[in-house]
Image (cartoon, coloured by chain):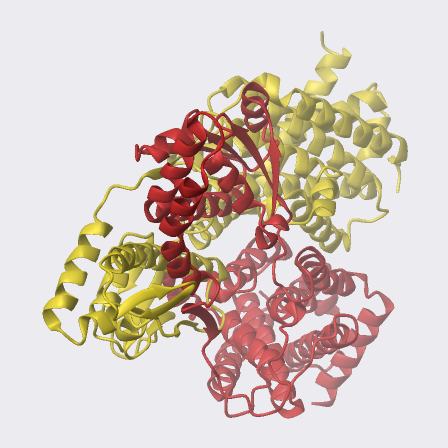
Chain colours: A yellow, B red
Amino acid sequence: MRGSSLWIVSNIAACDFKLTWKERSVIFWIFLMPIAFMLFFGVSFRGSGGSTPRAKLTVENQDGGFLSSELLEALRKESISLVDSLAEGENPVRTLVIPPEFTKKVLSRERTTLVIRREEGVSQEASEAVSVAVLRSLIRIVSGLIELEGEALEQGDRRFTTTGSTLSGSLWELGGGNGAFMDSIHVELDSLQTREPLVTVSSTMAGRAQELPSGFRGSVPGSLVMFVLMSMVFGGIGITQERVSGILKRLGMTPASRIDVLLGKLLGRMGVAFIQIAVLLLAGRFLFGVSLGSSPFALVALMVVFTFCTGGFSILFGSLFRTPEHMEGIAVITTLVMAALGGCWWPIEMVGKPFQILALVFPTGWAMNGLHKLISFGLGTAAILPHLAVLAAFGLVFLLVGARKLKWTA
Amino acid sequence: MRQALLIVLKDLRRRLRNPIAVISMMLIPITITLIIGLVFGRSGEVELPRIRVLLIDKDDGIFSHFLRQSMQQEQFAEMIELVEVDGNEGRAAIERGEASALLEIPENFTDDLLDHKPVQLGLKKNPAEAFLPVIVQELVETTALMLDSGVRIFGGPIEQLRSMFEGEGWPSRDDAGGLLDSSRDNMILVGGYMADSLISLRNEVAEHEIEEEGAGVGLNIFAFVLPGSLLIGLLFISQIALRDIVREKEYGTLARLFTAPLEAGHVVAGKILSAFAITGLSCILLVLVGRFAFGISLGKPLPLVFHLVATVFMCTGVITLCYGFIRSDRAADAVLPVVILTMCLLGGSMIPYEQMGATLQDVGRFSPVFWAVDGLKMVFIERANLSDISLHLGILYGLGILTVVPGTALLRKRMRSGG
């Protein structure tokens, strides 16, 4: 056994693995920074996507009639937060301005405009949610009002009637300023609003998971993929350092073949990446409550192939430079580009089709897509077979090109 | 002083001979800004791709056609790609993540609605997508609400219409006339809201004072992103520039320097000044790239210059203080990136400050990076005056002094003791 290829490979791998953990900074980069990113991005994007954001809306009611109260009642049923009072010095983020005489104008069928005023720089997504909520509340109020107007027209009172295709008069004129009449309309409108809806929408998720990948469900896979790649790319700098310091040359003088050394380096890096992934997944599960899907085997398979792929990339990266100086900046840029375009920074469906296709040029894109299949859809191994194949192919190409380009002496 | 300046000149010459480390750090902000600009477009308004929605229509009646047509109206047609599929094919496709959502219209949807029986549409969402399925859900729920209202308002005439066609032979003229009469009033009532827009909804952004014509018009996303990424680059460049302090000790260069009549204070001052100069030059180059490559309007010259100087001073100061406590290159490599990235994370370099939650925003104001990024955005985007950014400038210059002075003292003490 001693002296055999397997023994040499495992020795080199174990040595590289141990040396990595000797650097204290590794703990920061491999574990603490990714967890900090998961936390920070998860908290910042907690309200986005899946759960409709509880957008804040302050109401400036200049009306005082019953229709504005009905509108506010309808708004309370929507997924937004109506702000009742502002703290001293606090500015409203979004304000719905209900104009003076809103009730009278609507009942008189005169034109009126509601305004949603938002502060510059506030979340566009939350503002859209507010617009939709106000629109839906208006539809509810107006449809109830039309039903009441229809009933009033049937009474044939000449203060509110139709001639041909022309409508003359209005509910307001029909009431003639009579408080009791307005109260009765208010009560009837109220009762119309409490009816059970005829058409409802039952919304479920495909796959087995029941939540959309926003907040931590988005930040955990994204940070994991980005920081594993970053560790491996920086691991590539180690190979260049070993070449410059002559360690690779010395290894070359031992009975270890080139392949033994490369495989040892690869396995050592894969071991580090795998520990990193395990810790980050556990942190995702137990610190941030992210589901890891329903197929542990598939998840492990995907992560093993991803570590192989990034390990191969590490060797390729280490083979591309003559000296380790200046590689750090390039390593950061390489990681940022691959992570951003691969979909680690933002949900990939938000970007245009060309960028969605471009994502699949990078292993990060395949890793993210595979993680979504497992974590978001809750699917099993069969669903990620193409991902496993592509990532393995990436890894093999990186390794072969890296092995070919790697110089053993400085 | 002369000795310090000579050290600055020597360091600048060294950097010019071998600028790759600094250039690679300068490429970080350029790359981040470029990627975000390319992906989200110059205006920064996210143009979502067409949302693919699968439709299984088991009803094929008037109301399912209404739903379909509502989702293919002019304004939605550009946004939604509605693809009709059969049951099994559709369910398999959504399970494979081939669409953002699957809408299922149940059997007897129209008949049940005409009988005023509650009906339920099924919407299955793609769990791998965070935004698009939510948009589809909002759209379907709003359409369902409109249908609900329509059925209640036009329930009578629609029922009449159905019984007319259920009878034998063609409807009589009287039947048709009665139908028109009964629906006419409701059509007129609805028409007031639909065609005459009796109630309209206007969205507006709160007005802010804009002193100069054209200012603030058309947000350039690069102007929004560059300040944050610039700070990441500048802090790392300061780190590279000040790294010599520990490296020269490790390489023995300092010991050789001190064989000459040179004081520790001169060396420290020279190193800090050269770091300031290198960071400042990089900052100027990055801002010029922002101006000419990304078309960023740089705002008013005086506030820009004052703010950039304050930013570079703060960056150099913070890193100087850090090196005051760090004794080796390895320790610097371990600690400084963590310090820099934490300050940048909290200060709004990686996520816009406005996007961060309230708690993170409160914490973020303690990061020096926040004051640099926020001030720079005000200069670029709002064409702020000196008075507008006076608080930012005060904090940045104050931080610069509060970090440079103790940092210099610590380094000088260490150099004197040979530690």
Residue A311 at what x, y percent from top left? 70, 32
User: How many numbered circles are shown?
Assistant: 0
Looking at the rendering, which quadrant does residue B328 occupy?
bottom right
Residue at far left of view:
A180
State the residue in front, B45 or A401: B45
* In the image: residue A202, left or right of residue B62: left
- Could you tell me which quadrant the N terminus of chain B lies in? bottom right
Q: Position of residue A100 (x, y in %)?
A: 29, 79
Q: Quadrant of the C terminus of chain B?
A: bottom right
Q: Is residue A302 above or below residue A407?
A: above
B354 sits left or right of A268 in the view: left
Toward the viewer: A347 or B3?
A347
Q: Is residue B154 left or right of residue A262?
A: left
What's the residue at 44%, 37% (across, down)? A283
User: Which residue is at the front of the view, A122 or B115?
Assistant: B115
* Residue A51 in view, yes or no: no
Query: Residue at (68%, 59%) from the top-left corner?
Result: B32
Q: Is residue A167 visible?
A: yes
Q: In this orientation, which residue lies closer to the viewer: B69 or A376?
A: B69
What's the residue at 72%, 64% (across, down)? B30
Q: What residue sits 61% from the left and 62% below the top?
A: B45
Position above or below: B281 against B34: below
Residue furthest front as drawn: B173
Residue A401 placed where, x, y %? Answer: 86, 32
Point out residue A160 in the picture as x, y percentages from the top left corner: 28, 67
